[in-house]
Image (cartoon, grey):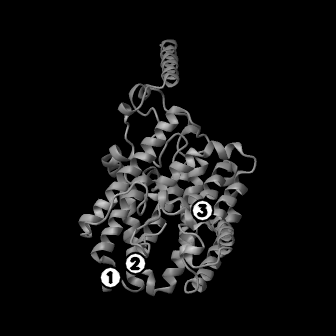
Amino acid sequence: MTASPRPNGNHRGTPLPPAPSPSSGAPGAPAPGSGGRDARRPAAPAAKRRDAFFDNAKYLAIVLVAVGHAWEPLKGDSRSLQAAYMVVYAFHMPAFILISGFFSRSFDMRPDRLRRLITGVAVPYIVFETAYPLFKRFVDNDPQQEISLLDPWYLTWFLCALFIWRLTTPIWKAVRHPLPLALVVAMLASVTPEIGDDLDLQRVLQFLPFFVLGLCLKPEHFHLVRRRSVRIAAVPVFAAALAFAWWAAPRMNTGWFYHRDSAQELGAPWWAGPVMVLALFGCSLVLTACFFAWVPGRRVWFTALGAGTLCGYLLHGFVVKAGDYKGWFEVSALQGPFGEILVTVLAAAMVTLLCTAPVRRVFRPVMEPAMDWAFKRDPAEAARERERYEADRAREKVSA
């Protein structure tokens, strides 16, 4: 969840990505049936259209992701920036993951949903897990950089985690107490350094409770946090969080916020792992609720950008890493408060541009590939399409 490198030189980062719609396998993917025969159908009823609140939340969260990555090289000498960084990292990924879980409630092993999971999550993971190391080879002049699909690199960990979480969704829907069980799994992971780096399983397991919580939520829960009283209460809560982070910045290891290491790997006693999992879960949950309270529920100028957060998530990393490799963040003009503000504005503008429709169209072949050639025709889906088509024809004849 951070842009900073591990001691062994493997660069990892936050992600992303962004939460999918109920019918999509990846963040920002179009609804199935948007072309071909289904294109002749009437527009979907209002109840099935995209919810402006969630698109707004995804866009604002991806802006925080990009800003957090841009702050990483600058925060070393600024205690205030370190405090802001800690607060942002406490809730921006939990918010994304919670939304992802909420929109995974209907996931099952139906062939069409598995197909969307592969094309919308697994394929982008393979493409960008290959692209990022190649980018480092050429831009950073590092011919030794290896490509490995088992060791998520920088931003791709979220796609790997989302794939695993969604495959386990039927299990969490079947057990009696899913959230307590997920918390136990996360606590056990925090004291198990033997898990290793394969598929970034530490992050997968330690962030798991937020995904499971999303599976358990209902629409009315989001309405509760969007009340006026909660919006007002969020102001002192964030102020208190910033004050605490300013105090804790020189005293606390920010590695706890990344959830990528066990307690022992962070130099802490084993019992600190479960304690920090529970403490950070509670802290992240409160800040996430406050964040949702401030998200607009109506359509605004950036609502449409919420459908393109996958592009913004996966592509902004190339810009941030290029700046890191080329030393852009070391320019003297960027040191100090003015430079920090400038970098923040530029990062927000950059990721906003990457979420726009033209960028999405260019990268759709790798972000949202159709891949009809790779899958067998599902007989049940074909039958459902024939029934819908015949029903549409019958309605047309009646109206004529």
Q: Quadrant of residue 249?
A: bottom right
Graded by Cα atoms within 10 Å as few (under 14), some (14 to 19) or many (20 or more), the crowding at tag 3 reads many
Three-letter residue code for mark 1: Glu
Residue 374 location in percent, x, y?
38, 33
Instruction: Look at mark 3 in the image and give the residue it sits on.
Output: 206
Q: Quadrant of residue 37?
A: top left
User: Distance of mark 1 from mark 2, alpha carbons?
Assistant: 8 Å
User: Distance of mark 3 from mark 1, alpha carbons?
Assistant: 33 Å
Task: Assess whether mark 2 and mark 1 are in contact (beta carbons under 8 angstroms).
Answer: yes
Sequence-first disc among 1 and 2: 2
Vertical position of residue 257 compared to residue 77: above or below: above
Q: Foreground mark, 3 or 1?
A: 3
Graded by Cα atoms within 10 Å as few (under 14), some (14 to 19) or many (20 or more), the crowding at tag 1 reads few
Three-letter residue code for mark 2: Pro
Residue appearing at x 35%, y 46% in the figure: 366
Please, what secondary structure does the residue beneath circle 1 have? helix
Three-letter residue code for mark 3: Gln
Sequence-first disc among 3 and 1: 3
Instruction: Look at mark 1 in the image and give the residue it sits on.
Output: 330
Residue furthest to the right in view is 176
Residue 90 location in percent, x, y?
58, 70
